[in-house]
Image: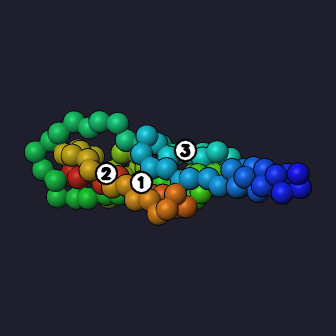
Amino acid sequence: MKKVKNLMFAAGATLLLSSCASVKSPLTGVLYSDVKAPLTATSNSNSSKVGSAEATSILGAVATGDASIDAAAKSAGITKIHHVDEQSTSFLGIFAKYKVFVYGE
């Protein structure tokens, strides 16, 4: 009976202490979330500048950052957006990063 209780305790502790950092749609944090994600952008003819913005998540418990198109455009002084690309990175559900690239003039 003691082995069953120990096994149940270990399984419960594992479930409570394990967490996964996820990417896209936007990052979610179980304990704290301060994330913005891009939507869509209109196209213009030139793309001489590139700006970026990112948001990160650790263990899916804390997510922070501003991965908005506006933040990426402001980082490079872009006023006319040509197109937007995105990059998602995740490492074993421990660390996740979502990065937005804005191209324009």
Identified at 70% across, 55% down, the residue is 14
* Between 39 and 18, the one nearer to me in the picture: 18
Q: Position of residue 11 (x, y in %)?
A: 72, 52
Q: Mark 2 and mark 1 in contact (Cβ < 8 Å)?
A: yes
Q: Secondary structure at mark 1?
A: strand
Q: Position of residue 82 (x, y in %)?
A: 19, 45
Q: Mark 1 and mark 3 in contact (Cβ < 8 Å)?
A: no
* Between 66 and 56, the one nearer to me in the picture: 56
How is the structure coloured here?
rainbow
Q: Secondary structure at mark 3?
A: loop
Residue 98: mark = 1
Q: Which residue is mark 2?
A: 86
Residue 37 higher or lower than 60, as above or below: above
Identified at 21% across, 51% down, the residue is 104
Q: Position of residue 85 (x, y in %)?
A: 26, 50
Identified at 37% across, 55% down, the residue is 88
| Amino acid beneath label 2 | Glu
Q: Which residue is mark 3?
A: 28
| Amino acid beneath label 3 | Thr
Q: What is the distance, in whole Å, between disc 2 and disc 3 at their CAs?
A: 17 Å
Q: What is the distance, in whole Å, between disc 1 and disc 2 at their CAs?
A: 7 Å
Is residue 58 rendered to the left or right of residue 51?
right
Query: How crowded is the residue under tag 2: few (<14 C-alpha within 10 Å), some, or many (20+)?
Result: some
* Between 4 and 61, the one nearer to me in the picture: 4
